[in-house]
Image (cartoon, helix red, strand yellow):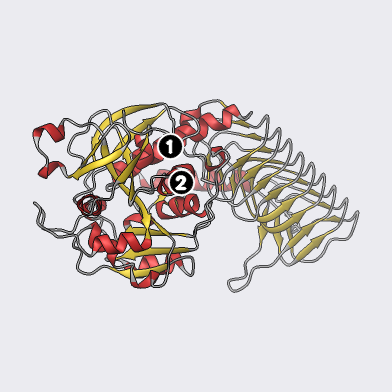
Amino acid sequence: MVHRCAQIMMRIEQCAVEIEADNCERKITHAQVVARSFFKPQAIGAIAWLMTEFATIILAAGKGTRMKSNLHKVLHPIAGRPMLDHLMASAGQLKPSRTVVVVGAGREQLEAALGDRAQTCLQEPQLGTGHAVQQAQDALAGFSGDVLILYGDVPFVRAATMQAMLDRLHADDAPAVVVLGFEPGDPMHYGRVIADESGRILKMVEYKDASEEERACRLCNSGLMAARAEDMFGLLARVGNDNAQGEYYLVDVVNVANADGRHSAVVVTDDPGEVAGINSRAELAAAERHWQDVRREEAMAEGASLKAPETVFFSWDTQLGRDVTIDPNVVFGPGVSVADGAKIRAFSHLEGAKVGESCEVGPYARLRPGAVLEQGAKIGNFVEVKNATLGPGAKANHLTYLGDATVGAGANIGAGTITCNYDGYFKHRTNIGPRAFIGSNSALIAPLNIGADAIVAAGSAVSRDVADGELRMVRADQMVKPGWADRFHDAMKKKKAGTKK
């Protein structure tokens, strides 16, 4: 048995899926998730925070050719969040003092996405993962803490696992390098970690360079490592490229340390899904599916009812209260919170919206950014709400657009009502007072204020303010011509009959 004091326990079913890595010495596996805590950062328990500074080096220089996309591979979203941001959020829980992202193709996209959250350095040409890490040396000049090597296309490594690696680095035996290992159901062509019973690494070897005896080892290399900065860059300077690929393998730092009489250690995760690499659209979809499966289980465990869980899609930041009911085919975009007792009916789409207690949304409703429903408000079928607040008990039950508006408590918005908020250049607001009644098929031409208890008659096009308690009816006078329709029909029938002769 290898050293397991830092294992991260998860229940999984292994899928035999081979992943093509941009850096050829690193091959990662996918796992089918069945445990509910897989992607939940909040599930991390008490963490032994290190006093030693550490920096993260995230490798993201691969071309991502299998993704066949103009968007950089690590910027492809899972649950509405770029995979790189998933990884950085987990690492961020440990508060690294520096973050360096190694970039290559598509560097402009990465630099724009990162902003001031990380420093970037360029790997060009791309000569392997060891060479990639070396490019971060100048960015970490003068840094004497630890470095944690991560991969931008391996987004679901948990903070607890990263912490376990750093803790192992500072154990009493002070290993030169700590490697994160895993034992997949099918080792396939992954690099092997040859370790003794205490977890000390005897040798790191890529599958292509391994003997049959070494290939029989089931402990595989995830590619993730931790080391003191001085050790990491000192060892990398002595790594050669005498291998089947002619590249500078990061894993060879372990072999160089062994040659010096120093030892390295392996920390093993029992969750291969944690080190799942994403290199293609199919693998991206698999990661999305696994994330959603776990989030659905989590939502139900926390008190929400999902009538057809497999048809509900959450964003990474969706917040649900207790006793929320979600019907089939509901999609949550980023920035949605749903309070206790709310009901989200079928085929609704919510993004950037706040749904209050006991509200009802849908079916076939769309809540866009800035939509706020206060307690007991109702949005019905084919209603769209954008940057608008509905007060307590307010209703818009069907076929309505409410944009840039405030609707007072208890107000009723009739079917077919439209807030005409855009004049082609600027957006304008409509304010509807408490208990106001807006008749069906009304056009409210903003800017406009409608007072409390006011009534707008059906079919009105209102362009001037309506006072409290006032009735506003804007209709053309109706003309009545007795017998006109009968004469019209007779004339048309004779004309039509004449054309057939």
Relative image position of residue 224 (x, y in whole percent): 33, 48
**Are the two marked residues, 1 and 2, in contact with CB atoms closer than 8 angstroms?**
yes
Would you say residue 127 is visible in this rendering? yes
Mark number displayed over residue 445: none
Amino acid carrying label 1: it is Ala
Judging by the rendered image, the residue that carries numbered circle 1 is: 6
Where on the picture, by quarter, is residue 342? top right
Query: In this view of the protein, which residue sits in the foreground, 297 or 327?
Result: 297
> Taking 463 as reference, is 83 left or right?
left
Relative image position of residue 465 (x, y in whole percent): 82, 64
Amino acid carrying label 2: it is Asp
Q: Residues within 10 Å of mark 2 (few under 14, many from 20)?
A: some
Where on the picture, by quarter, is residue 193? top left
Would you say residue 501 is visible in this rendering? no
Relative image position of residue 462 (x, y in whole percent): 75, 61
Q: Quadrant of the N terminus?
A: top left
Up-down relation of residue 37 to residue 206 (above or below): above
Up-down relation of residue 489 to residue 188 (above or below): below
> Taking 335 as reference, is 22 left or right?
left
Q: Quadrant of the C terminus?
A: top left
Mark number displayed over residue 167: 2
> Taking 360 as reference, is 431 left or right?
right
